[in-house]
Amino acid sequence: MNLTYLKNAHQFRTIIDIGANDGAFGAYLQRFFEAEKVIAFEPQAKHRPELESRGFEVHTVAVSDKSGTASLSVTEADSASSLLPVADVTKAEWGELVSVVGAEDVRTELLDNCIDGKFDDELLIKIDAQGFETEIIDGGKATFGRASCVLVEVSFLPIYDGQGLFNDVHQRLDQLGFRLSGFRSQHDSAADGRPLFAHAVYEKH
């Protein structure tokens, strides 16, 4: 994923990593942008030790638009685990990798309730939340208002039942003052070539 133009245009000191999983991508972003701090959100408790070993500030919660609890469906490939049911198109594309092998009760919380204080330097928010992107934005408007850039995985077809698609994410970020500057890492269907998802890059107007 080529993000050189962002590095040339911004000096991110803090990265909020929503859907951090094991932290590998967050660690890459931290090295690439030479960021001082990563605030990681990952609902699967098993990933907390590894995230902490990377020096991240860790919140073991699922970021949402409401406070409470929810059941996380854990899939064979745990990076596909979600609060939403896996859609048929996803099962057809990835088969056993997205089969549900368990469930984990997780705490849900608004991003704005987890992030306090001001960011004096430029802030990057990265979202890879398996279909829960619109809920994350709805519960984090104040925090998104402080960010200068958002890197978010967006879907063009429902990967999970009931999820918001690209247009839903785009509308919310546009209303918060972001402009779409491009796409990275688009994944197309192996069956018919239809675009399924990509990383969208947004910068503040």
Image (cartoon, rainbow, N blue to C red):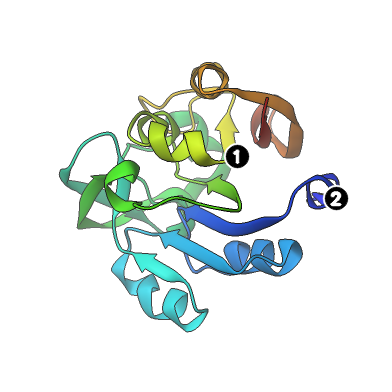
Q: Do the CB atoms of the residues marked 1 and 2 lie less than 8 Å apart?
A: no
What residue lies at 51% left-to-right and 30% top-to-bottom?
89
User: Could you tell me residue 201's position as x and y percent?
Assistant: 69, 36
Side (left or right) of 9 relative to 165: right
User: Could you tell me residue 181's position as x and y percent?
Assistant: 75, 29
Q: Quadrant of the C terminus?
A: top right
In this view, the residue farthest toward the left is 68
Q: Is residue 3 above or below residue 178?
A: below
Q: Nearer the viewer, residue 22 or 99?
A: 22
Q: Is residue 178 above or below residue 24?
A: above
**Amino acid, disc 2:** Asn
**Structural distance between the alpha carbons of marks 1 and 2:** 16 Å
State how many labels appear: 2
What residue lies at 48% left-to-right and 59% top-to-bottom?
20
Describe the element under mark 1 as helix, strand or loop: strand
| Residue depth check, mark 1 versus mark 2: number of the one nearer the observer | 2
Q: Nearer the viewer, residue 62 or 35?
A: 35
User: Could you tell me residue 196's position as x and y percent?
Assistant: 63, 30
**Amino acid, disc 1:** Val
Q: Which mark is residue 150?
A: 1
Side (left or right) of 185 relative to 66: right
What residue lies at 60% left-to-right and 39% top-to-bottom?
150
Residue tagged by mark 2? 8
Q: Is residue 59 above or below residue 9?
A: below
What residue lies at 38% left-to-right and 80% top-to-bottom?
49
Residue 29 visible in the picture: yes
User: Could you tell me residue 132's position as x and y percent?
Assistant: 39, 36
